[in-house]
Image: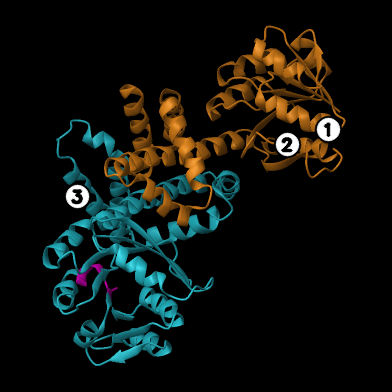
Chain colours: A cyan, B orange
Amino acid sequence: MKVGFIGFGEVSYRLSNILLHGKVEVFTSLEGRSDKTKKLAYSSEVVILDTFKEVAKESDILVSANSPNSALAIAIKYGSLTDGLFLDLNNVSSNTTEKIANFLSEDHFIDAALMGGVKSDKLNLFVSGKLSYRIAELIGKLPASEDYKINVKIVSDKIGDVSKLKMLRSYYTKGVSALLIETFETAKSLGLDEDLWRVLSLTEGENFEKYSKSRIINSYKSSKRKYEEVEEILEFLDELNIDDSEDFDDRIMMCIATKNKFEYLKDKN
Amino acid sequence: MKVGFIGFGEVSYRLSNILLHGKVEVFTSLEGRSDKTKKLAYSSEVVILDTFKEVAKESDILVSANSPNSALAIAIKYGSLTDGLFLDLNNVSSNTTEKIANFLSEDHFIDAALMGGVKSDKLNLFVSGKLSYRIAELIGKLPASEDYKINVKIVSDKIGDVSKLKMLRSYYTKGVSALLIETFETAKSLGLDEDLWRVLSLTEGENFEKYSKSRIINSYKSSKRKYEEVEEILEFLDELNIDDSEDFDDRIMMCIATKNKFEYLKDKN
C-alpha cells in the first residue's frame, strides 16, 4: 500500500509514523513548504518526491492534512489526479466538505477526522462516505501492534457525517471552554479558584484540572479563531432549521452565548 | 465526641455511618419525620432521642442536613440550643448562609458542604468559618481507616466561602448540563448522538458518558428546580457587581444563557 501526504505537519507526521512502522510506503513532497515542515519531514522516514502531483499519482490513499483555508483548493487540484482514495483530514466545516464533494466523486472522496489526542502513536480515525469501508480494510491489513495503531471507526456511508461530528464536538468543547473561563474568572475574583479546582476535580475526573487549564489558556490565546469557528457552527445550525421553528434560538442558545463570549474575549484582547 | 443530626436523609446516614465506625456517639430524633427517614434511621446504629431539642443539647457537633427551605428555621431554633458547633450542610445559597450567620455567632456556626459523591463511606467535607479548624481536629481524632473516611478541607476562616464555592460549582456543572442537552439534542436530530458520545469520550474521560447521561436525565427531570438554582446564582453574581461595570453581563453571559435554557426546558415540560 502507498499513502501520500499533502501537507506534513504534526498530524501527517504521526500518521506516517504508524504507517511506516506497518511497512507502508509513505510519500510527501516539500514543494513550496516551510522550513519547519521540511525539518519534520526529514526527521521521518517518509519518501520525498519532487512534486505533489507525483505524490497524488503514486498514492492508493492521498491524505490532505493542511490548513482549513487550503483544503478546497488542494482537493480540486490533487484529488482529481489520484486513482486512489482522497482523505480530507483538514479541520473544515461541513460546508467546505460539501463543496469538496461537489468536485470529487464518492468513489474517491472520504470525509475523515482524527478524534481524541494526536500526539501519540495510537490514533482514532473516523471516516464517512461510500468507500470508508475501504479505509478500514486497508488499515486493517497493517501488522497488529499495540504501540502503533490506527483505530478506524466508520460513522456512515454519507459524506458530511464526520464533518458534522467534528462540529458537534466543537459545539460542546468550545461551550465548556467559555464556561470555564467565566466560572474561574468569578472564582478568582472571590479568591476561591484553587478551591474550585479541587472541588470540581472530585466529580469531573482526575485530568479535569490539567485539561481545563489548557483549554482556558488556548481560549484566551485564540479567541478570534474560536469565535470564527463558533460562527461557522451557528451557520451550520441555521441551515438545519429547515422548518423555521419559532423556538430555534432557544434550542441553540448555549451556542449563541458561546459565540458572544468569544466575541467579547477577542474584542477585549 | 457526640454528634447530632437534624434531618436523617442520605447525607446524614452516610456521615453517621463513618462516625459510628469511629466509635463516635451519634444522635438524631424522629420527631415529625417521614416514614422513609424513620426507616433509614432504624437501619443504622444511631441513637434516637425523643426531641431535636435534646439532640441539640447533647451534641458537640450539631449537623443540620435537611432541605434548603428549612435551613434557616432550623438554625434559628436549634443552633442557639447547642453549646457545640453548628454545621450547616443544607444546599443553601450564600444569601441564606449570611442570614444564618446573623443569628448564630461565629463561635458556633460553620459553613460546610460535602463535595464530590455522597454515596460512599469516603466523604469530602469542606468547611469555612473561624472555628472550622475545630472540625478538622475532631474528625482528625477518629481512628484511621481507609474504608471509612471523612477528608476535611478548611477553605478559609470566613463564613460564606464554602457557600460561594457550592455556587461556583453549580455555576459550572449546570452550564455543562445545559450544554450537554443542547449538543445532544442537535446530534440526535442528525442521527449522530451515539458517535458523539464515542468522540467526546476520547477526550473527556472514561466516565464522561455515564455521568453526562445522568446529568441530562436530571436536568430534564428537575428543570424547574435547576432554573431556580441558577436564578439564585445570578442574584449572587449581581451582588458582586459592586462597581456596576458596563461589561458585567458579558462577563456572566454563559450563566445567563444557562438560566434561559432551564427556563425554556421547564416551560416546555
Going by the numbered disc 2, the residue's amino acid type is: Asp
Which of the two residues, B22 or A261, is positioned nearer the viewer here?
B22
Q: Which mark is residue B121?
A: 2
Q: Which residues are magenta?
A: A63-71
The answer to whether B170 is drawn above or below residue B209 in the figure is above
Q: Quadrant of residue A91?
A: bottom left
Q: Quadrant of the N terminus of chain B?
A: top right
Q: Quadrant of the C terminus of chain B?
A: top left
Q: CA distance from mark 2 to mark 1?
A: 10 Å
Give yes or no for contact between labels 3 and 1 (Cβ–Cβ under 8 Å).
Answer: no
Going by the numbered disc 1, the residue's amino acid type is: His
The answer to whether B131 is drawn above or below residue B202 in the figure is above
Task: Read off the chain for label 3.
Answer: A
Q: Which mark is residue A235?
A: 3
For disc 1, the marked residue is: B21
The residue carrying pointer 3 sits among few (fewer than 14), some (14 to 19) or many (20 or more) residues within 10 Å by Cα, namely few
The residue shown at (28%, 88%) is: A30
